[in-house]
Image: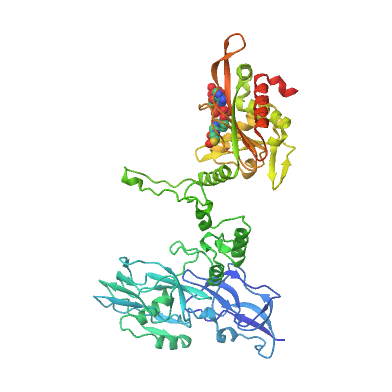
Amino acid sequence: MALVEVQVPDIGDFDEVTVIELMVKVGDTVKAEQSLITVESDKASMEIPSSTAGVVKELRVALGDKIKQGSIVLVVEAVGAAAAPAVATAAAVSAPAPASAPVAAAPVAVAAAAASAASGPVQVHVPDIGDFKDVAVIEVMVKPGDTIKVEQSLITVESDKASMEIPSSHAGVLKELKVKVGDTVNIGDLLAILEGTVAAAAPVAVVAAPAASAAVASAPTAASTPVAAAAAAVAAPAHAPGGTTVGLPHASPSVRKFARELGVPLAEVKGSGLKGRITEADVQAFTQAVMSGAAQTKAQAAKAPASSGGDGAALGLIPWPKVDFAKFGPIERKEMGRIKKISGANLLRNAIMIPAVTNHDDADITDLEAFRVSTNKENEKSGVKVTMLAFLIKACVAALKKYPEFNSSLDGDALVYKNYWHIGFAADTPNGLMVPVIRDCDKKGVLQISQEMGELAKKAREGKLGPAEMTGATFTISSLGGIGGKYFTPIINAPEVAILGVCKSTMEPVWDGKQFVPRLMLPLSLTWDHRVIDGAAAARFNAFLGQILSDFRRVLL
Ligand code: CAO
């Protein structure tokens, strides 16, 4: 078995290119022409194929390496009679190398010459793009009316081995584009018509290398452009991967093709490769995530009922009213923040899917508030302020222990009862509603809960809550007590089955059997999932909560 060194073939004008993807590993069996690595310059990305079939014995390049024509990519133990000689230094160059093809016309020396003036409409054609036939237009970068500079990229085309931008051979105003995304183009095809041409593309002398000479020679001869365009295509086929200017996803042509075949929106795939490059594995992982329901494409999200934008079609509802608000007065449109979008979608799902009922009640907290105020006076120096919400959390834990279905979750036809009591509390933050979670509230005192609540609320407002601080709640309290209001109907935070809403306490005349007495009354609104809890249980829960709050010693019972 002969060992063959596979080299980088003729890659045209490119002095040095960076290895951005390794597509094979030691031990792999490769076919002749199979892509081995992907390289990129700031102008193009291309795959380097194997000149020989065999088993990969040694990789001579690593990610990030700079290589050029003649660099050894890997060593293959060649198989079959067709195996190359022991050290096949010439193999790569002579191989029918797709990678070299996009730049096959590359060994082109562009020599400046005097610019010529042109006027009137000018046709821009697809220049010599090497061996490629029927390449797909994957991006159109200009539109009619745009002022185009010489060599400005007009479209991006790609084959399964390379992508490149096709530049304009002339400057002028784009009058007409003759291609659109999805079209396939070939050398000589009419791309665009420019008008008011300022100057013709720099006339060039093309010194074609042997491999390219035929293509150049056979290039269409529309007098105005082809040679210049061919040269320009080579000189500036700028697919800028990672593309700040181009905006294309950072991926090799074959990965883009793979994504297209699967219908994966590449722009939504997160790249794990070098410099965030999207690999085939990333596309696969994205597909799996979408298929398993763990992720959604933007298109799916737009169709789903969301806090806004969703049209309700998925629910068989009539379309959301579309109103041109500007017709009625001045408007300003602002995109909603990320947190609002996420919480909005969750709230909508919970509102729609849970048969929720809300019970309202009042709790007499006269004595509790007096105790809270005196405790805070005594603890003034400690810096920890005991809040009404902390007492409410403790009271709720007692009620949840007495009525455990309120601390459960639905799992199909079963109920999961949790023997821990982690309480979430709604926090109003500049970015929107967040629900930090205080763990093991059954084991903590009111002072500790107050302190943790203060810290978590601060973190929430600063947008610093970690995922672990927002998950695992068994029950949630939403307190608007510091703001005002009487009652409201909070939405259950699924998969929990109940939530307590609390509003501002007020002094009210309460009949004690003999007379009206002033009592501090706290409005409670308990929303519960009717699949799990029934009305009587909810009324009992509220009544029990009221008893505890009116005499907190009951917590100890
Ligand atoms: N009745 C009367 N006064 C109350 C009260 C109640 N139920 N609850 C709190 N207060 C008082 C407090 O005693 C405090 O007064 P002092 O400053 O005089 O001591 C004041 O209101 C402000 O309290 P607070 O809001 O800072 O503290 P908190 O512990 O009550 O609440 C937190 C903390 C994080 C829950 C709150 O800041 C918050 O974000 N609330 C909004 C929650 C929300 O948006 N819910 C809606 C969800 S559904 O969209």
State the count of labels.
0
The residue lying at 24 percent from left, 75 percent from top is 120
Name the foreground residue: 244 vs 369.
369
Q: Is residue 295 above or below residue 448?
A: below
Q: Position of residue 45 (x, y in %)?
A: 51, 72
The residue lying at 32 percent from left, 68 percent from top is 148
Name the foreground residue: 532 vs 387.
532
**Left or right of residue 75: residue 44:** left
Name the foreground residue: 328 vs 441.
328
**Left or right of residue 125: residue 439:** right
Name the foreground residue: 2 vs 221.
221
**What colour scheme has been applied to the protein in the rendered image?**
rainbow
* Residue 474 occupies quadrant: top right
Q: Quadrant of ligand 1?
A: top right
Q: Is residue 30 above or below residue 443?
A: below
Location of the N terminus (image quadrant):
bottom right
The residue lying at 54 percent from left, 47 percent from top is 345
| Res. 361 visible in picture | yes
Q: Position of residue 32 (x, y in %)?
A: 62, 83
* Residue 277 occupies quadrant: bottom right
Location of the C terminus (image quadrant):
top right
Q: Position of residue 183 (x, y in %)?
A: 43, 74
Q: Residue furthest bottom?
A: 81
